[in-house]
């Protein structure tokens, strides 16, 4: 009597079809999802004074994608914005969802000499709101202008140092590290990075942004 081999071509094909159906029915993803990173910031991340392809978000997104990462940066950066403004529009900025967030706010608080306690309260509220949603965060800090005096400068810097110690938070102490004060890397206003400054900025922050993407990818 002839018997069909238990693992012959027909059985193999049947198993493949069954496995494919199980993958479809259980919703197992065929590939990793696109990671959406909210950029909540001011003119430094909005690309003030630059053509769109030269701005921070365009250059950073291109750099992440060149590393093989499926990432889209969601623009929520508004020139002139303070931490209070960012706090007020956070819910709106999250309307379409986000998997991670880069927070770059505080420069305008410092330029206006606003009370560091208020800056800290605003940023803390933003971080807590994102944590409640399970959104990983990279907080990039800021320094006050030297003309405001050492006392104010120390108090302002301390805001970011304290916030940066929060568990699970990725922290970059100074967004303009290596760029501020260098005329070859800034526009004529001596505040906003020029295209080369942006490229330097992106290169420095890229490893931390990669860690942010990795953290977002681990969130269900």
Image (cartoon, grey):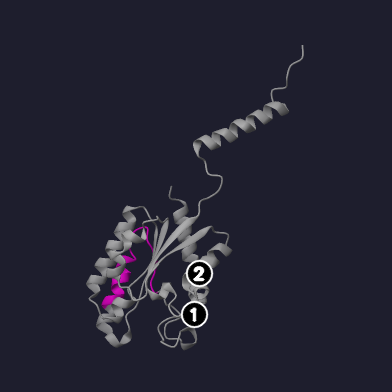
Are there few (<14), some (14-19), or many (20+) residues within 10 Å of tag 2?
Answer: some
Magenta span includes 159? yes
Q: Residue at x 42, y 72 (%)?
A: 46
Q: Residue 66 in the image: state x and y as whole percent.
A: 58, 64
Q: Quadrant of residue 69?
A: bottom right
Q: Which residues are magenta?
A: 155-174
Q: Earlier in the sequence, mark 1 or mark 2?
A: 2
Q: Residue 48 in the image: state x and y as whole percent.
A: 43, 78
Asked whether 14 or 150 is in front, the reply is: 14
Residue topped by disc 1 = 197
Residue 58's tag is 2
Q: Residue at x 26, y 67 (%)?
A: 122
Could you say whether the residue bearing mark 1 is in a helix, strand or loop? helix
Q: Name the mark nearer the viewer: 1 or 2.
A: 2
Judge whether 23 appears above or below 162 on screen: above
Q: Is residue 148 left or right of residue 25?
A: left
Q: Residue at x 50, y 51 (%)?
A: 33
Q: Residue 219 in the image: state x and y as whole percent.
A: 43, 50
Could you say whether the residue bearing mark 2 is in a helix, strand or loop? helix
Q: Quadrant of residue 162?
A: bottom left
Asked whether 187 or 123 is in front, the reply is: 187
Is residue 102 visible in the rendered image? The answer is yes
Is residue 166 visible in the rendered image? The answer is no
Q: Is residue 47 left or right of residue 108?
A: right
Q: Is residue 75 left or right of residue 153?
A: right
Judge whether 161 appears above or below 179 on screen: above
Magenta span includes 47? no
- Is the N terminus in the top left, top right, bottom left or bottom right quadrant? top right
Q: Residue 121 in the image: state x and y as whole percent.
A: 24, 66
Q: Residue at x 32, y 70 (%)?
A: 161
């Amino acid at each position: 009597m002839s018997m069909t081999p238990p693992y012959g071509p027909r059985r193999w094909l049947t198993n493949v079809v069954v496995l494919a159906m199980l993958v479809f029915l259980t919703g197992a993803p065929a590939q990793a999802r696109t990671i959406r990173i909210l950029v909540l910031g001011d003119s430094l991340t909005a690309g003030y004074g630059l053509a769109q392809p030269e701005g921070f978000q365009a250059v950073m997104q291109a750099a992440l994608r060149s590393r093989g990462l499926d990432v889209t940066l969601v623009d929520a950066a508004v020139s002139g914005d303070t931490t209070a403004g960012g706090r007020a529009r956070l819910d709106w900025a999250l309307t379409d969802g986000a998997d991670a967030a880069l927070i770059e706010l505080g420069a305008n608080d410092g330029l206006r000499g606003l009370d560091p306690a208020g800056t800290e309260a605003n940023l803390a509220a933003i971080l807590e709101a994102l944590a409640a949603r399970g959104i990983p965060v990279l907080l990039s800090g800021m320094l006050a202008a030297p003309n405001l005096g050492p006392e104010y400068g120390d108090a302002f810097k301390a805001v970011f140092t304290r916030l940066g110690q929060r568990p699970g938070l990725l922290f970059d102490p100074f967004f303009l590290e290596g760029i501020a004060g260098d005329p070859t890397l800034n526009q004529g206003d001596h505040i906003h990075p020029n295209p080369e400054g942006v490229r330097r900025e992106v290169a420095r922050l890229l490893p931390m942004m990669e860690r942010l993407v990795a953290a977002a990818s681990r969130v269900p």
